[in-house]
Every structure is written in C-alpha cells, then in structure tokens.
Image (cartoon, helix red, strand yellow):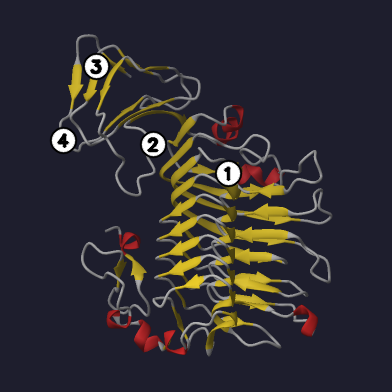
Amino acid sequence: MSVTGGTTIANDGAGNLTLRADAYGIDNGGSVTNLGALDWSKSTGAFSALYDMNGTYGAGTQLTNMAWTPAPYSGLLTQSTAYKLVNSLTDLKSVASDLAGNYALGKDINASATSDGSYAPLGNSVTPFMGQFDGQAHTVSSLTLQPWAPADQNSPQLMGMFGVIGSKGVVRNLNVQGTGVFAEPYNAPYGFMGMLAGMNSGTVVGVNASGNLNSNVTAFGLDATVAGGLLGANAGTVLRSSSSVSVIAGNVLGGLVGANSGLITQSFSSGSVESLSYGNQGAGGLVGYNTGVINQSYSTSPTLLRGYCRGPSYTPCGGAGLVIVNEGTISQSFATGPVTQPFYQPIGIARTNNGTITNDVYWDKNTTTAAVGVVYGTPIPASNGLTTAQMSTPASFVSYDFSPTGVWAMPNGATHPVLRWQLGQ
C-alpha cells in the first residue's frame, strides 16, 4: 500500500486514518510506503500504518499536531503509529523477537495448537515487553499458557499471554481466552499468573480475559502463587478492562488482579475465585492484596475458601467480596458475589483494611450473605451493606454519575450498576 508522490492526505478535524497493507493476503510481504505527505498538524485525530510481519514501512513526510493529546481511555501514545500485523499464531510467537515493537492483531487467532506446550510468555522479568500491542477488538482464543521458569531460582515463575509488561508497554483493545496450570514442583520460590500477564508495570486498556487458571498446590496450601484473572500483579495502570476467568490458587488471588500496587479504574470481574489455602489466605472478588488505587470498579465474582483457618495464630483469616487486604485506597466500587468460607464468616468488602475505603463503597448483603464489610482494621459503616433491591436503585449511590455521559448506568432489570462503557456508550 502506498501514498504516491506529490499526494497530500490531510485532516483538520477529529478523523482517524488507517493505512493497511494486507488486503490481498496475510504475511505476503505487505508494506506501507508514504511517498507523499500525511498532514494531521491541524487534527485531533490519529493515523496508523499496518504492515505485514515480513513487510516494510516507509514513513515519508508526516506532519503532526504539536498540541495533540490522546483520546481518554484510547491507550494511544503518539498521533502517528506504525504497527506490524499479527495475523497468525506464528506471528504472535514472533513478537518475542522484538519486545519493543508495535503490533496490531489483524484478525482473530485460534491458538488451539498451543495445546502442545509450544507457547512461551511474551517478555519476562529480564526482558519485559516494552512495545505496544493493539488487539483492535480481536480475540486470541484457545491459548494454552506455559510458565516461564527463570534461570535464577530467586526470581518468580511467570504465566500469561505476556510474562511481564514493562513500564513502557501498552496492551489495548484485546480479548484473550485460554487455560493455564501452574504444576508443582515449582522451578522458582514463587510465581505470578494471569490470563493476560503474570506482571504488569505498563498500561492495560480495554482488555477482556476469559478461561481458566489453576495453580496446583500441596495438601497444606504451601503454594506461593499470586494469581488474578487478568493479571497476577499490577504495578501499572488498568483501565476499562474485565475478567471472567475462573481462578484457583493457594496464596494471594483476585478475580481481576492478584496483587495491585498501581491503578485500577472502571474495571470489573465476574469469574469464580477459589482459594485452596490451608493457612490464613482467602480469595478477593476483584483483587487479592491492594496497596494501590481501585476506583469505579466492581466484582460479581463468587469467592470460595476451600481450606480452613487453623486457629488463633492464623488470624486474620479468609477473603472477601472485593479484596482480601486493603492497604491502599478504594473508592466508588462495590461487590455482589457470594462469599463462601466454611468455618468463617463471609465478608462484604475487605477482610483487613489498613488503608482508605471511602463511604461510596458498597456490598450486596443479600447476595454476598455478608453482614459486615470489614473485619480487621478500619471498619466501614454497616449501612454500606445494601439489599439487592437497594443495589438496583441509582438513588442508593449518591456519588455515582448515572447521567447519559456519566461513568455508571443502570439498565432495565439490572440488579446492580454497570459501567457505561460495557454498553458501548
């Protein structure tokens, strides 16, 4: 695909332009060459070039808007971006050869061939993924995850489509579905597992994960896995993302993120979360251990502590509808999933709160069966436990914005608020 010499393509509005080189076949050497000029110097939009993995890109003359800023929640870094197209499982694996490159899914990818154990996470704790990966709303399905085992056995074992997304890495507009099992014996003292990534220090926007993750453990729950449906650990930013992954593990686990020290906003989880711990850990519906910020997010994930609390020396014990432990900040969020903990009471929001939980954080006391929001640390008002009927009423959520352009919506027949972006609005 080429822009001929002497031709200028210009825009002075908010329009976007995509130049794509694979119209006549994939991995056919499709290239993008600009011999003219692309003038977006008066535009608030963006333009991109998509070319085959075995193609080339000639940027040519490009004029950009020096005052340009990315649209909210777009995940874009620059007004002009060139991406290598990922159109096959082979292409996806090839991302490992340039972990600082920019990539875009050109189509849905059926990764069922990875059941042979051939897939290795993209990036690790030594060489993280530092590029951009735009799923363009496509899906990587039937992905069988395999752990990355470090040569240094003091480093973590990692599992995910990505092993580690680094501080400059961006993953956006992607659906990923698969399965992964951490089996003993570990080749490392601990591990991080998530359907998208074991660890994230970058930006994740508009990513939806589904499938199953399981960390096999010993009979006494000595597993050291930090697991989340989307991410094992997040030290970066997670925006408008979700997980319906079923997670089973034995240490710190959450429906969306296992351990969060970064930012999570406008995101949710719905997959079941099951803790096999026989010590003092449970399951968090959204996040296991939070030392960061959770805002405008929620969980409907059922949580189950299959193990039991082993006496006073193991208290505090158990999990909760939203997080296990909060040492950060949680605001404008809620939990509705059933909390099942044999030999221990269900908890609505957090087992332990040593941080800040604002007064606009709620739980459904009918569906969670929890009479209390917090057991240890700073409590939250019992009145923040709402009935399902109250959860279905926007008036119960005074600080939530349900306006046509607001963050939240209450569809007809809904039993709790949803994020407006879920409705495509």
Residue ID at (29%, 73%): 411
Q: Is residue 383 above or below residue 163?
A: below
The amino acid type, in three-letter code, at marker 4 is Gly
Q: Which residue is mark 3?
A: 37
The residues bearing labels 2 and 3 have C-alpha atoms spaced at a distance of: 21 Å
Relative image position of residue 221 (x, y in whole percent):
79, 69
Q: Which residue is mark 2?
A: 77
Res. 13 mark: 4
The amino acid type, in three-letter code, at marker 2 is Leu
Q: Which residue is mark 1?
A: 111
Residue ID at (49%, 82%): 380
Relative image position of residue 27 (x, y in whole percent):
48, 25
Residue ID at (69%, 86%): 342
Residue ID at (50%, 34%): 131
The amino acid type, in three-letter code, at marker 1 is Ala
Q: Nearer the viewer, residue 202 or 10?
A: 202
Sooner in the amino-acid sequence: mark 1 or mark 4: 4
